[in-house]
Image: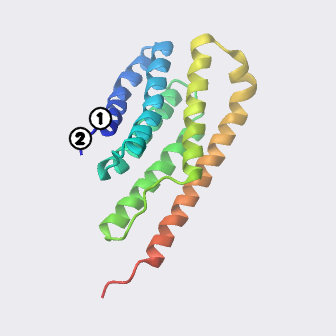
Amino acid sequence: MVNLPNTITVFRILCVPVFINLLIYHRFRSALAIFCVAVVTDGVDGFIARVFNQRSRLGTYLDPLADKVLLMSAFMTLSLLRQVPIWLTIIVVSRDLILAAGTLLLHVLALHVDIRPSWLGKVTTVLQFGYIVATMGAMSVAWEVWSGEIAGPAAITVAAATMGSGLHYIWRGTQAVRTEPVAR
C-alpha cells in the first residue's frame, strides 16, 4: 500500500493547507507555484503507477480524492477572495459531493463501483485545473484580459464540463445498480 505513487499523492494532499494559507495571505505567486507543483504530481503519480506497475487499490481511491480536495479548496478559497464566481464553485463542489455520496451509498449497499475516471471526467479535471491556474496567474501579474474577456466564457466551459461529467458519472452509477444481481 505504501509505494511511490501513493506517497506522491499524499504529498499533493499535504500541499492543500499550504496553498490555502498562501492564498489567504495574498501570496498569489507562491500559491500558484504550489498549485502547479500539485497539478504536476497528479500526472507523475499516475505515470509511475502505470509504467512501474505500482497500481494499488488505495491509489484508486486516494488519487481522485487528492484531486477533489485540491480543486474544491482552490475553488472555495478563490470564491471567498472574489476571484472565482460563486455559482461556478457551487457547481464544482456540489458535483463532487453528489458523486462522493453516491459512491458511498453504492459501497454501503455492497454494489460494485467502478471508480475509474471517465474520459469526460479527465477532461473536466484538466479544465478545472487550467481555470484555477489561469485565474491565479491573472492575480499574480494583474492580467486584465483574463478577468475582462476570457474568464466568463472559461467559467461557462468549466461549468458545462463539470455538469456533463457529473451526469455521466450518475448514469454510470445507475447502470451499476441495474446490472448488479439482486440479493435474496
x%, y% of residue 165? 58, 53
- Occupied quadrant, residue 150: top right
- Occupied quadrant, residue 155: top right
Q: Are marks 2 and 1 in contact (CB under 8 Å)?
A: yes
Residue at x-position 46% and y-position 71%: 176
Residue at x-position 51% and y-position 33%: 75
Residue nearer the viewer, 118 or 71: 118
Give the mark, 2 or 1, whose residue is nearer the N terminus: 2
Is 151 left, or right, of 88 in this rendering?
right
Amino acid residing under circle 1: Thr
Above or below 171: residue 88: above
Q: Where is mark 2, residue-wise?
A: 2
Mark 2 and mark 1: Cα distance apart in space: 7 Å
Mark 2, other Cα within 10 Å: few <14 / some 14–19 / many ≥20:
few
Tell which residue pokes out farthest to the left in this image. 2
Q: Where is mark 1, residue-wise?
A: 7
Quadrant of the snapshot with the C terminus:
bottom left
- Occupied quadrant, residue 137: top right
